[in-house]
Amino acid sequence: PCPGCTRPPAHIAATAGAGLWVGNGSRMMTAGALRINLLPWREARLLRRRQLFFVSIGGAVTFALLGTAGVYMLMASAVAERERHNVDLGEQISEMTKLTSEQEAQSADLRRQQAIFAQSRQLHAARIRHSRLLSALPQTLPQGLALGKLRFDPTAIQLTGSAASARHVSQWLQMLETHVDIATAELQSLRLNQKPGTDARQGYYYQVRLGLHGAEAVYTPPGSDL
């Protein structure tokens, strides 16, 4: 208290209950204890700090929410952009796959046409050799050998006729095996002609099979699988 004051300062608060004043200006407690606030500015400072703390917490939470929302929007935008890019990439892949399929189909058609053309050339060359062989076959017949029937198919020529002896047939087969257009010469049958009054040149009946070059070439119509 200040000098000469008879009452306590304003910041001195008494508790509930009555008190007695003494001669020196003090008061005796009779019913309760006194509560004196010596530093009133401390409570104000604590209040301001508390308010500032709550404001800071609120601002931090607000900034955190705003930052999270911004990051989420950026991530959503990046994901959407990536999805659009994936869609475009998928369309490009589909186009490339379609183009590749078309090119493979064209390549398959080209290979099929080339195979057909090669087979056609083989068949044509085989037909030329066969025609040349049929034209030259009568000149290969030796003396004592006669040609009776001839049957031609794409793989071989069947010859039947008569011969004076088996030796004539054997010599003829050896000659035929050296011919350029004949792959194999096979004697399938040789039997003795036992009919009375038979000509000497018809003492034996023979059957010969001539295998031809190019007989493995098989024609495949266009559009069929090779």
Image: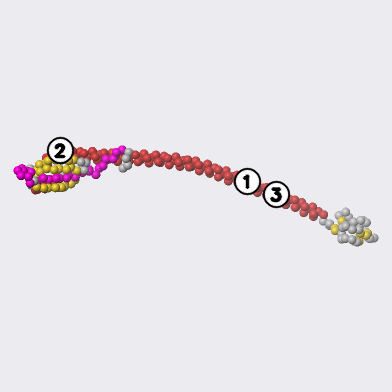
Q: Mark 3 points at which residue?
A: 58
Is 107 one of the magenta-colored residues? no
Label 1: element kind: helix
Q: Mark 1 points at which residue?
A: 69
Q: Quadrant of the N terminus?
A: bottom right
User: Residue 117: where, in percent of width, then height?
Assistant: 28, 38
Q: What residue type is labelled 1?
A: Ala
From this viewpoint, which residue is outermost toward the right?
23
Is 207 one of the magenta-colored residues? yes
Q: Name the residue under label 2.
A: 135
Label 2: element kind: helix
Left or right: residue 81 versus residue 132 is right
Q: What residue type is labelled 3?
A: Gly
Q: Residue at x 21, y 43 (%)?
A: 155
Q: What stretch is highlighted in magenta?
A: 194-222
User: Residue 222: where, in percent of width, then height?
Assistant: 31, 38
Q: Is residue 55 above or below residue 18?
A: above
Q: Residue at x 36, y 39 (%)?
A: 106
Label 3: element kind: helix
Name the foreground residue: 70 vs 45: 70
* Of the image marks 3 and 1, the number of the one nearer the N terminus: 3
Left or right: residue 55 versus residue 126 is right
From this viewpoint, which residue is outermost toward the front?
196
The reply to whether discs 3 and 2 touch (Cβ–Cβ < 8 Å) is no
Q: Which residue is drawn at 32% across and 40% down?
A: 224
